Image: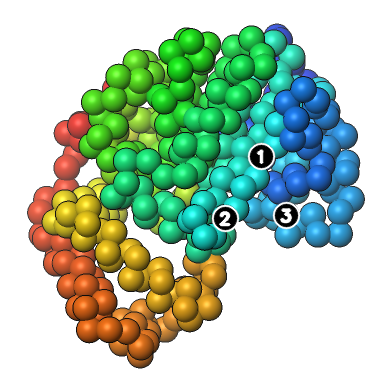
Amino acid sequence: MNNMVDYVYWRGDILFSQLPPNPVDMLIFSELSYLRFDGIVPEDPRFSAPLRTVAKTFLSLEDAEKRCRVSEDLTLLKALADSARFGNLGLTFYRNRFVPQEDTQFAAITYLLDDGSACLAFRGTDDTLVGWREDFDMTFQDSVPAQRLAKDYTEEFAAGSEMPLRLTGHSKGGNLAVYAGAKSEPAVQARILEVYNQDGPGFTEHMMSDPGYLALLPKIRTFVPQASVFGMLLERREGYTVIKSSQFGLMQHDPHSWEVMGGNFLVMEERTRDSYFLDKTFRAWLEGMTREERSKFFDAVFDLLMQDNVSRPRDILKLQNILTYFRALHMDENTRSTIVSVLSSLIQSAREANSRPQLPDSEDPHDSQ
C-alpha cells in the first residue's frame, strides 16, 4: 500500500503553484504539526524559515525522535525536505502552549505555500493526560481552551496577512480547525478556502445551530478511516469520506496508515461494524448523562489518575484491570458511586448497541454522498 511518504516521492517534483493542495498534502501538514519545533520555527509570523532548513536543524538534534509523535515522522520530514514541492515552503508562527493547571494543550504552525496561500495546521491530542482531559471536556463544554486559542491564532495570523487561508488538523486538531474557521470574524472566514478535519471529533449540540459553523459547512472536508472511533464522537452536520487504512481498530487513527492513491485517499463505501457499534455505545452513554454528570465523572477519574502519578494515557494501558485499579484507590463514597454508576451505564449501553442490528452505510445520516 502507498502512504504519505510514497506520495511525496511520487508528487514531490510538482510545485503548489502548478498543482493546488490536495487531501494528502493537507494530511501531511497536519502530521507535521505534531513535531515539536520549539526553538527552530519562528514564533513571529513576520518571519519564516524554509522547510528544508528547518528539517536539517531538526534532524540534527539528539532528541529528534522524542520530538516526534511517531518515528515515521522522521522519514516523512526527510522526504519533504528533499522535494521541490515542500522543501522551500516557509514555516512560521509556531505556537505551543501546555498549561496543566488549565487543562490546556495547544500547538499550531503555519505553512506559506508558493501559490500565495497559507495553511494553518493545528496539532491533535499529544501523549499527555492533560491533552486527553481537554478532549473529554468537549463532551460537556461548548468550548475548551484549545478551541479558543485556535480561533485567536487564526485571527492573529489573518490580521497580519491578506493571504487566502486553509485550515487543517488531525484528531483534536481537526476539531480545532473547524472551530477556528467557524468562530473567526466573517471577514476572516471569507478568506478561508477549505477546512480539513482528519478523524477529529464533532461538537456539542450548541455548535449545530451556530451561524458561523453553518456558513462554514460548504468548506469543510472531513475524512475518517473505516474503523473510526474518535471521528465519530459528538455531533456534526457535514458529511465525511470513509478511507482505507492498513491498520486495524484504534490503530487506524494513525495517518501513516491511511492508504493513498494519486493525490487522494483510497475511498471505502462504509465504516466497519465495530465503528458503528462503538458510535452507538458512546452516544447512548453520553445521552444518558447530563452535562453536570459528565463533568463530575471526568473530574473524578482524572483527579484520581493525577493523584496516582498517571501522567500519560499509555500508563493507563499498563493497568491489568481498570476496575480493580479504581477500587484500590482511596476516594470518598460519592466519587466511588459516580465512577461505578457511569461505568455501569457504559457497559449497559454497549450491551444494548450490540443487540441492535447494524445500520448499513446508506442509512448513516452523517455519511458523505
Q: Identify the residue position indicated by label 2 in the image.
A: 99
Q: Mark 2: which amino acid?
A: Val
Report which residue position mark 1 lands on.
Answer: 95
Task: Please give the residue where the numbered disc 3 appears in the rendered image.
Answer: 67
Quarter of the picture holding the C terminus: top left
- Asked if residue 24 is positioned above or below residue 130 in the image, the reply reads above
Q: Which residue is depicted at the point 45% across and 17% down?
A: 185
Disc number lying in front (2 or 3) = 2
- Residue beneath the point at 40% across and 68% down: 302
Separation of marks 1 and 3 at Cα, in angstroms:
15 Å
Callout 1–callout 3 Cβ contact below 8 Å: no
Q: Which amino acid does label 3 sit on?
A: Arg
> In this rendering, would 111 be left or right of 104?
right
Task: Confirm whether residue 4 shows in the render.
Answer: no
Residue 113 sits above or below residue 355 on the image: above
**Image spot of residue 69 (x, y percent):** 64, 53
Measured Cα–Cα span from mark 1 to mark 2? 13 Å
- Marks 1, 2: nearer the viewer: 2
- What is the C-alpha distance between the residues marked 2 and 3? 18 Å
Do tag 1 and tag 2 residues touch (Cβ < 8 Å)?
no
Q: Which residue is drawn at 51% across and 75% down?
A: 310
Sequence-earlier tag: 2 or 3: 3
* Residue 84 image-quadrant placement: top right
Q: Give coordinates of residue 260: x percent, y percent.
A: 56, 33
Amino acid type at circle 1 is Arg
Whichever of labels 1 and 3 marks the residue nearer the N terminus, that label is 3
Q: In the rendered view, would you say 62 is above or below 72?
A: below
Between 227 and 285, the residue placed more toward the observer is 285
